[in-house]
Structures are given as C-alpha cells and as structure tokens.
Image (cartoon, rainbow, N blue to C red):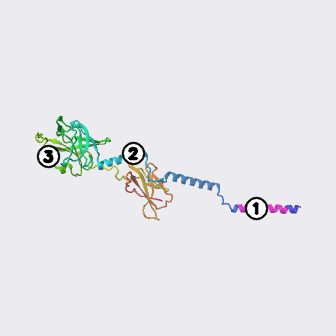
Amino acid sequence: MKKKFFVFLTAVVLLSVISYQAIAMNQPKEQSAPENETQDLKQEIEEETAKLTKAVAHKGDEFVLLDSLKKRQAELEEQLKIQEEGIKPARIQIPSLDIDTGVIPVGLLDNGEMEVPESTEVTGWYDRGVQPGAVGNSVIAGHVDSKEGPAIFFYLKDVEVGEQIIVTDENGTELTFEVKRKESYATNESPIAEIFGPSDKRNLNIITCTGTFDREQHLYPDRLVVYTELVSEDEPSDPLKVTSAPDNVAYEAGSVTWHAVRNDTVIGYRVYKKSEQDPRFVHVASVSAHERKSYYDPDSAAGDQYYVTAVNLKKKESAPSEKVTGN
C-alpha cells in the first residue's frame, strides 16, 4: 500500500513540474520591476511630447481659421475689392462748399453726351466708366442752376486746389479725393479722352456748366471740370502681400519650433524636411496660426534639415526660414 501511494505521489509531482514548464514556455519572460518602470516612463514622455508638438491633421481645409481670422479675411477681401473695383457712389460731399447730396447712376443721351439727373439737387455718376476709387477716370456731373435758382454745383467754381471731396457708397464706405486742378472748356472743345478716358491713377472728375448763359440757345457755352485724385500713398498697398518668414527656428530632440509671425493675415505655417532618403525639401506638416508653433517628427534622424514658411489668408507663402539640422 505504501509503495502504491509513493508511486502515485511521484507521478503527481512529475505532472506538476511538466505543467509548470509548459506554461512557462508559452509566456514571455517578465522584465524586472525597475526595467518595466523605466520603459513605461519613457513611453509616457514620448506620447506627451508628441501630443504637445505634433502638427494637428485637419480634415478639409489645410488650416483652421478662428472667428477673428474669418472676420479679418472678410475685411481684407472687401478692401482689395474696393482697390480693384472702386465703390458705387451713393453720396458726395464737398465740405468747403457745404455740399452734401446723393449720387445716382446715369448713362448717355441719344446725342452721345453724358446724361444728367432730372433733379437739380442730386448728382449723376457715369456708370459706363469706372467706379470712384478704381484705376481710371470716374466722372460725376451735376447742374449749376435751374429756373428756380442755384443748383447743387452752383458754387463748384469756388473749390480750391488741395480741398477734399468725399464719396460714399450705400454701405458707408468712404473714399476721399483731393482737388488737383480745375479747368473751363468750351463745350465742343472739352478734352473727352482726358476726362473720360483711361488713366493709371485713381481719379474722380467733377463736371458742371459754367460761363454766361446763352438765352437764345438755352444753354451754357462752357464746361467746368474739377480734377481730383484719390488720397492715398503712391499706390494702395496689398494687405495680403507675402509676409515675412518665421524666425527663431530651432531643433531639439525631434521637435522643430519657431516664433509666430506678427501679422494678422497669417493663417498658418508649413514645415518642410530634407533627409538622406529624399534630398528634396518636402512639405511634411501644416500648423494653424492659433496652435503651438512646433512640429514633432517621430522619424527624425541626425542630419535631417527643416525650414518653416508662413502662409497668409490669400494662401501666399513666405520665403523659407533659416534651416535647422537634426542631431
């Protein structure tokens, strides 16, 4: 009996040893506690670094615009539109003459002359020409008098060089013009090309009748033209011109960082990379203007080069920043 029990006990022990070895062979070797903690900490640091510095991949548009940038974009687009097209005038003011009246669009009469408003208290803008503020000669005309007496431009002859004329559209956009000179011409000798023709400046020409009224023909023999030019710098600047490149570009531990460009038209930045595998600079990331000014490259290697550009609302890109090299 004891012999049988001993054989049974030995069999149980052997079976237990074999089972333990089989389980051990099917399981990976466990790392020591200190090594586990080090590995976990390293992974946590890498994940946190990537989360803080890696460019966010946006669906749809390359850059995300905050509401403030969207508002600025609308303002700049309207500004550019005015520079290119001018404004449709609805009001004209000549402060020195106490003139403040409306403007309506007019065309041509059957005889080829510019039409004028029926009312003697409003003015007419020649709508077959350019709008005030655009490159070229814009023309506004008005009556000098009527059967009842002086009309809106009765005192236009008294305007002086250097005085201002303000034109406003129906949305309240104002353009200011400065009087450059005034000339009187016999009606049939008026320089039509100079008054209505093309120009490389942004002119507004104001016309009315002048001279001694001819009672037999019921008209004035002469035309008074006041030549004005838009008040601005030599040439209106493009608010969406290419901006300057980012500065203070640096590289450290796989991350490229830079300083924001101080320009309210910048919507984001593009990061470019050149490596041994691809000797060309390739666009690798886009970072919106409101995001952290940095990019984490998980594939960075020693010798890789990077540069950053700024992109504005018109999608114009700056020149490359200074280049930095991975270590």
**Which label number is shown at residue 187?**
3
Q: Is residue 16 left or right of residue 60?
A: right
In which quarter of the view is residue 250 placed? bottom left
Q: Secondary structure at mark 3?
A: helix
Cα distance in 3D space between marks 2 and 3: 49 Å
**Which amino acid, mark 1?**
Val
Q: Nearer the viewer, residue 68 or 60?
A: 60
Query: Callout 1: 10 Å neighbours few (<14), some, many (20+)?
Result: few
Indicate the position of residue 79 as horizontal and vertical percent values: 33, 47
**Which label number is shown at residue 233?**
none
- Decide whether residue 18 is among the magenta residues: yes
Indicate the position of residue 311 as horizontal and vertical percent values: 39, 53
Please name which of the two marks, 2 or 3, marks the residue nearer to the observer: 3
**Residue at mark 2:** 71
Q: Main secondary structure of the magenta part?
A: helix
**Residue at mark 1:** 17
In which quarter of the view is residue 156 placed? top left
Q: Is residue 33 above or below residue 101?
A: below
Q: Which residues are magenta?
A: 6-23
